Each structure stands twice: as structure tokens, then as C-alpha cells.
Image (cartoon, rainbow, N blue to C red):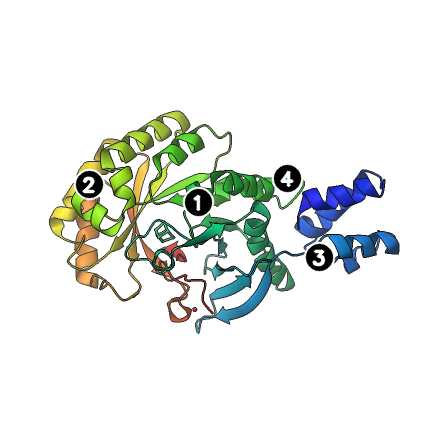
């Protein structure tokens, strides 16, 4: 729902100010499904709003559920026909995490990612981002549950759409609106240094995650072109500055790719890169999901990699993946009628 458009319609009709709060409450708190449900609004007002402001700007085209039943992936069509995806993961611990897209497509070209292979279409608006969460919140409400976490790990690079992403975070966090605690929201970047610096100055306790995937500039540049613009020394300087300012943890995501970044020496390099700040830096190893170009590392390799990090004092977890069978897992979102849905083990 476009709140500015609602405000304009209410102003044009000289409606009392409390109508906006009622509309927001119906949308974000009561999770109503349409203007027709606002029984406290006079019929003529409901009809005017219905005509001028769509209740939802996203239309769900398909909803797929994983065989295990713990993951739902939705393909949405935006008002201009762009296709985006979002995913709900239900963990056994009771967490219901929504992974949202921040862009239609992505210009960053990470070679392991299905979204990157598609190229960039456009930035999403804050409303389009928030509505992905609202969609799942309505479904969960019907089951007596609610969204507990939101991660910006779907299609797109959030810091390439910084203002809309932060606006969406504020909307989700608004205590008079959706009311999700900032600590339950995570923004993940492939390493856009100016975005990290800006986020360090935000007065919100939002979590930051970095798609790292290699501690070697040569390898990282091969698999993540962003490393040419922001190599590891620039990235780590920005993160050291971020942690010094915020005292907040940073999660480093690391996809294990066979014979690319999974050797013992790669694990030692990673420990070297992060060891000076092991109190606030932690590693999340992720199982690679086939997008055609790479192979996933085997379990023995993963166990060895983890042990090296542990022995060197680096906090490390391994993610249990969600939704691989419906291409809803990390790196698989493509905005087709077919990234990142994982929970820590
Ligand atoms: S991993 Fe993220 S930043 Fe890289 S291409 Fe995919 S969506 Fe874009």
C-alpha cells in the first residue's frame, strides 16, 4: 500500500486525520486483505480509495512449497510487470523468516548466483519490499503465527537501493505499524563500502551480513566482480570502522565451492582476515546450491574447514538450507516462474 497516495486521497476529500492511522493499522497490524474490510470507513470513502489506491501493489503469481513444508516461495508480479521472488522459512525453533528482494534482477554479476545471471531490471520501492513481508504475515496469521525475522538476502544488492531499503526497514520497524524489532532485521551486502559506511551511522540496531565467499582478492574478484571496486582491504577497513562505531556483530557468509574456496589454506586465510576482531566477526558457512557453474564442497571438506576456523578462534556456524527443491535456496532466486533461505544449525 502506498501510504502517500492514501494520504493524498484523504486530504483531497478533507477526511479527518485519524483515517490515515486507521488505514495503516488495518494494513500493517490487522493484516487485512482489502479496502472492503475497513468497515469503520464510510462506503463512499472505501470506494474512492479502492479506485485510487490499490491495497496491494504486488500480485502473487505462483506460490510453491517445499516437500518438507518448511519453505514457501512466492513469485510476485509488480504493477509494471517486473517479476520478483520472496521466501518464507519456518524453522523448528519457531522462527519464521522472510527473505525479501530489494531489486528486480541484480547488476552485481556474482558468478554463483541465479539472480546475477539475469542482469538488472530496476530498484524496488519501499512499499514493494514491505509488501513481500506483509504477504507472508497474512498467511502466517491464518495459522496463528507471525513473521519473526526479515532478511534482505533475496534478489538484488540492498545497498544499490539504499534509501528504499532503509525506508522499508523503518516501515517494518515502526511500532505503530508492523512493529518488527530492528534486531530481527538483517541487511546483507556483497560488499558495497559506501553503503556499509552509511549504515554505520543509522540509528537502528539492524544486523549487517557480508557475502564474502573468499579471503583472497584474486579468487574473490573471479567470483564476485564487486571485489574490483571494493577489494578486501577497503571492505575490511569499512567493517572495522562499522564495528568500532556500532559495537555490533557482522556475519560473513561463505559459500563452500569445491576447489574454488574450500582448501585448508583458504580457511587459514579467512581466519587471518577476521581474527583481529573475532569478538564481533563470525562466519556462516553455506552449502552451495547448484546453479550450473560450481560444485558444492563435500561434508568432509566442510567439517575440516569449520574445524580450522574454530581452532583459530573464529566463531563459525553452518546453515541448514531451506527450499532447495523449489529453487528457493541461497543463490537460486531468479524471478522466473523457479537466494537465500537458510537458518543456522
Ligand atoms: S549474490 Fe546478491 S549481489 Fe551477487 S548477483 Fe546475486 S543478488 Fe546480486
Assess whether mark 3 and mark 4 are in contact (beta carbons under 8 angstroms).
Answer: no
Which residue is depicted at the point 38% across and 55% down? 119
Q: Is residue 136 left or right of residue 177?
A: left
Q: Which residue is mark 2?
A: 271
Kindly identify which residue carries mark 4.
175
Figure quadrant of the C terminus:
bottom left
Label 3 sits on a secondary structure element that is: loop
Q: Residues within 10 Å of mark 4 (few under 14, many from 20)?
A: few
Residue closest to the eye, 317 or 112 = 112
What is the number of the mark on residue 32?
3
Is 116 placed above or below 237 here?
A: below
Is there a contact, CB below 8 Å, between mark 3 and mark 2? no
Disc 3 from disc 2: Cα separation = 49 Å
Q: Would you place residue 189 above or below residue 263 in this image?
A: above
Q: Position of residue 244 (x, y in %)?
A: 35, 26
> Nearer the observer, disc 2 or disc 1?
1
The single residue placed furthest to the left in the displayed view is 265
State which tag comes first along the sequence, 2 or 1: 1
Amino acid at each position: 500500500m502506498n501510504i502517500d497516495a492514501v494520504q493524498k486521497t484523504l486530504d483531497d476529500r478533507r477526511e479527518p486525520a485519524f483515517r490515515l492511522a486507521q488505514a495503516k493499522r488495518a494494513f500493517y497490524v490487522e493484516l487485512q486483505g482489502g479496502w472492503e474490510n475497513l468497515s469503520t470507513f464510510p462506503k463512499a470513502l472505501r470506494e474512492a480509495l479502492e479506485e485510487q489506491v490499490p491495497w496491494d501493489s504486488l500480485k502473487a503469481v505462483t506460490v510453491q512449497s517445499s516437500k518438507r513444508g518448511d519453505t514457501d516461495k512466492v513469485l510476485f508480479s509488480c504493477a509494471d510487470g517486473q517479476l520478483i521472488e520472496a521466501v518464507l522459512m519456518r524453522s523448528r525453533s519457531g522462527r519464521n523468516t522472510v527473505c525479501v528482494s530489494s531489486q528486480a534482477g541484480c547488476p552485481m554479476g556474482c558468478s554463483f548466483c541465479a539472480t546475477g545471471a539475469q542482469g538488472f531490471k530496476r530498484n524496488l520501492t519501499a512499499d514493494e519490499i514491505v509488501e513481500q513481508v506483509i504477504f507472508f504475515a497474512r498467511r502466517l496469521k491464518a495459522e496463528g503465527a507471525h513473521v519473526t525475522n526479515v532478511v534482505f538476502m533475496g534478489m538484488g544488492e540492498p545497498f544499490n537501493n539504499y534509501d528504499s531499503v532503509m525506508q522499508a526497514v523503518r516501515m517494518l520497524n515502526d511500532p505503530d505499524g508492523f512493529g518488527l524489532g530492528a534486531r530481527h532485521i538483517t541487511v546483507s551486502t556483497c560488499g558495497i563500502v559506501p553503503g556499509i559506511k552509511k549504515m554505520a551511522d543509522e540509528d537502528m540496531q539492524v544486523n549487517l551480513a557480508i557475502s564474502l565467499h573468499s579471503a583472497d582478492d584474486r579468487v574473490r574478484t573471479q567470483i564476485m566482480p564487486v571485489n574490483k571496486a571494493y577489494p578486501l582491504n577497503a571492505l575490511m577497513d569499512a567493517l572495522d570502522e562499522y564495528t568500532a562505531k556500532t559495537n555490533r556483530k557482522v556475519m560473513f557468509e561463505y559459500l563452500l565451492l569445491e576447489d574454488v574456496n574450500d582448501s585448508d589454506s583458504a580457511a587459514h586465510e579467512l581466519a587471518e582476515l577476521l581474527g583481529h576482531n573475532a569478538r564481533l566477526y563470525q562466519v556462516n558457512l553455506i552449502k552451495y546450491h547448484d546453479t550450473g557453474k560450481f560444485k558444492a564442497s563435500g561434508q568432509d571438506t566442510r567439517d575440516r574447514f569449520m574445524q580450522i576456523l574454530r581452532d583459530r578462534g573464529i566463531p563459525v556456524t553452518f546453515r541448514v538450507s531451506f527450499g532447495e527443491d523449489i529453487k528457493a535456496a541461497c543463490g537460486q532466486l531468479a524471478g522466473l516462474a523457479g537466494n537465500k533461505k537458510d537458518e543456522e544449525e
